Image (spheres, helix red, strand yellow):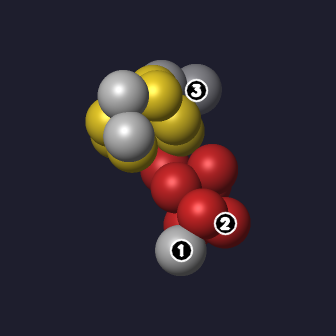
Amino acid sequence: MAKKPIYIHQGIEVTRDDRDSLF
């Protein structure tokens, strides 16, 4: 399974799913 894209949120690396929960 391919790795999910990583986004930087306030200096914290989060997965796409985690990013969705932040907003």
CA gap, disc 1 and disc 2 = 6 Å
Amino acid beneath label 1? Phe
Look at mark 1 in the image and give the residue it sits on.
Answer: 23
Residue at left offset 45%, top offset 26%: 13
**In the image, which disc is placed on residue 21?**
2
Asked if residue 15 is positioned above or below residue 1 in the image, the reply reads below
SS for callout 3: loop
The residue lying at 61 percent from left, 54 percent from top is 17
Residue 16 at least partly seen: yes
Mark 2 is on which residue type?
Ser
The residue depicted at 39 percent of the width and 43 percent of the height is: 9
Tell me the quadrant of the picture where the N terminus can be found.
top right
Residue 1 image label = 3
Q: CA distance from mark 1 to mark 3?
A: 25 Å
- Disc on the earlier residue, 1 or 3: 3
3 relative position to 7: left or right? right
Cβ atoms under marks 1 and 2 closer than 8 Å = yes
- Cα distance between the residues tagged 3 and 2: 22 Å
Residue sitting at the far bottom:
23
Comparing 1 with 8, the one in front is 8
Counting the numbered discs, the total is: 3
Q: Nearer the viewer, residue 17 or 2?
A: 17
Q: How many other residues sit within 10 Å of disc 2, few (<14), some (14-19) or many (≥20)? A: few
Q: Which mark is residue 3?
A: none
